[in-house]
Image (spheres, grey):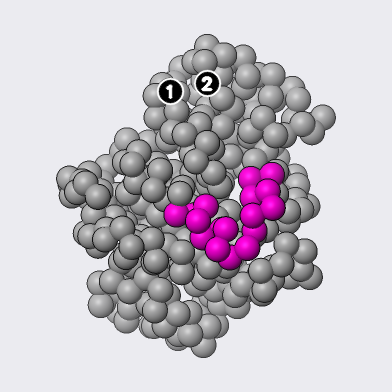
């Protein structure tokens, strides 16, 4: 495997905008997910071995395209296992890739597509300590960033001093600490997180949040986090498939027409346009592709050739949904 230039690899180590494209494994580590049409991507091949082969194929394609940031989580089924196996089988040097994972959700679907609960949230100290050991087993020295998965004010994790102390201990050993956000109160949660210190030192090095053309409301808070020195990672830039050709909902048609008109000028797909908008954020370090197939990844990569500015930037206000409506719609997406 060719060895890349280290200076271009670590968006969390002094990397400045423009942002880079990363790969998220939410749709590759388990047989069911909430992305529109996810079942079409997996077809009948949803065994552990079939999913492993698909994950390896997409990871190989991502590496070949220059992607050097990969994000997974304890709750992504076998996401950590697949990623760790891929890194070792391809003999990827640890200093040539940035690997992030998350703790706080436990995968409970037992490899079923239809399950009462696919994951259970628990931000307690006991879960952190257990999942840290599990992550170390799978990723070991490859791990660069460990994130609280979907931190919210309601979960209490931002007030748990025992958890903060344990995260600070892990940070002292060289692992960067971050949090991911979800829901209509992302900005408020982030504002609270930025004030957290342990022994006079800021706890968080990075934040991962949802920002897309339908839900850009966290942008001001993410800009503030960037100016405070945090790496900012954008997730769900395609709104779980709602910003792709798969979204045929009547409520999306007017927005789709506006976006398709702009896409036509670049001879680009909707997904590439949506990712280009995210990549254009001056405060973003990494924008995650959630590609589940090599074809999706190749389409996503076209975003890197699109100059999102001027008229395109003015389009954002006309596409955005009211945040509460956006998150209500997301909550109603079906695991498939």
Crowdedness near tag 1: few (<14), some (14–19) or many (≥20) residues, C-alpha within 10 Å: some
Q: Outermost residue, right direction?
A: 250
Q: Which residues are magenta?
A: 40-56
Q: Main secondary structure of the magenta part?
A: helix
326 is within the stretch colored magenta: no
Marker disc for residue 268: 2
Is the C-beta separation of discs 1 and 2 under 8 Å?
yes
Give the vertical position of 153 relative to 295 (above or below): below
Upstream in sequence: badge 1 or badge 2: 2
Residue 175, image quadrant? bottom left
Visible in this render: residue 39? Answer: yes
Crowdedness near tag 2: few (<14), some (14–19) or many (≥20) residues, C-alpha within 10 Å: some
With 137 as the anchor, is 117 left or right in this view? right
Residue that numbered label 1 is attached to = 306
Q: Position of residue 25 (x, y in %)?
A: 50, 55
Q: How many marks?
A: 2
Visible in this render: residue 100? Answer: no
Q: Nearer the viewer, residue 314 or 174?
A: 174
Give the vertical position of 56 relative to 275 (above or below): below
Q: Nearer the viewer, residue 203 or 90?
A: 90
Q: Position of residue 85 (x, y in %)?
A: 39, 66
Q: Residue at x 33, y 78 (%)?
A: 170
Q: Nearer the viewer, residue 187 or 5?
A: 5
Q: Position of residue 182 (x, y in %)?
A: 59, 57
Q: Residue at x 23, y 54 (%)?
A: 96
With 235 as the anchor, is 38 left or right in this view? right
45 is within the stretch colored magenta: yes
Residue 271, image quadrant? top right
From the image, state whether disc 1 or disc 2 is nearer to you.
Answer: 2
């Amino acid at each position: 495997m060719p060895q890349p230039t280290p200076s271009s690899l670590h968006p969390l180590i002094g990397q400045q905008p423009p942002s880079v494209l990363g790969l998220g494994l939410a749709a590759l580590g388990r047989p069911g997910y909430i992305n529109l049409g996810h079942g079409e991507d997996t077809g009948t091949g949803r065994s552990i071995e079939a999913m492993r082969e698909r994950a390896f194929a997409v990871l190989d394609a991502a590496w070949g395209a220059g992607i050097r940031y990969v994000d997974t989580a304890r709750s992504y089924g076998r996401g950590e296992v697949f990623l760790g196996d891929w890194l070792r089988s391809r003999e990827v040097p640890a200093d040539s890739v940035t690997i992030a994972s998350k703790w706080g959700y436990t995968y409970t679907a037992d490899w079923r597509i239809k399950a009462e609960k696919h994951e259970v949230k628990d931000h307690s100290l006991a879960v952190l300590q257990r999942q840290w050991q599990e992550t170390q087993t799978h990723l070991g020295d490859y791990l660069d960033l460990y994130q609280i998965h979907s931190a919210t004010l309601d979960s209490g994790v931002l007030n748990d001093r025992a958890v903060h102390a344990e995260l600070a201990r892990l940070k002292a050993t060289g692992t960067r600490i971050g949090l991911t956000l979800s829901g209509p109160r992302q900005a408020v949660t982030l504002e609270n997180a930025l004030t957290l210190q342990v022994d006079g030192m800021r706890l968080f090095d990075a934040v991962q949040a949802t920002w897309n053309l339908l839900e850009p409301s966290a942008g001001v808070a993410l800009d503030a986090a960037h100016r405070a020195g945090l790496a900012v990672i954008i997730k769900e830039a395609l709104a779980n498939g709602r910003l792709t050709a798969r979204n045929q909902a009547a409520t999306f048609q007017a927005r789709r027409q506006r976006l398709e008109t702009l896409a036509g000028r670049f001879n680009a797909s909707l997904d590439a346009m949506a990712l280009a908008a995210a990549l254009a954020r001056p405060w973003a370090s990494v924008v995650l592709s959630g590609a589940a197939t090599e074809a999706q990844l190749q389409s996503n990569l076209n975003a890197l050739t699109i100059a999102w500015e001027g008229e395109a930037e003015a389009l954002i206000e006309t596409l955005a949904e009211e945040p509460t409506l956006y998150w209500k719609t997301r909550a109603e997406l079906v695991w498939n």
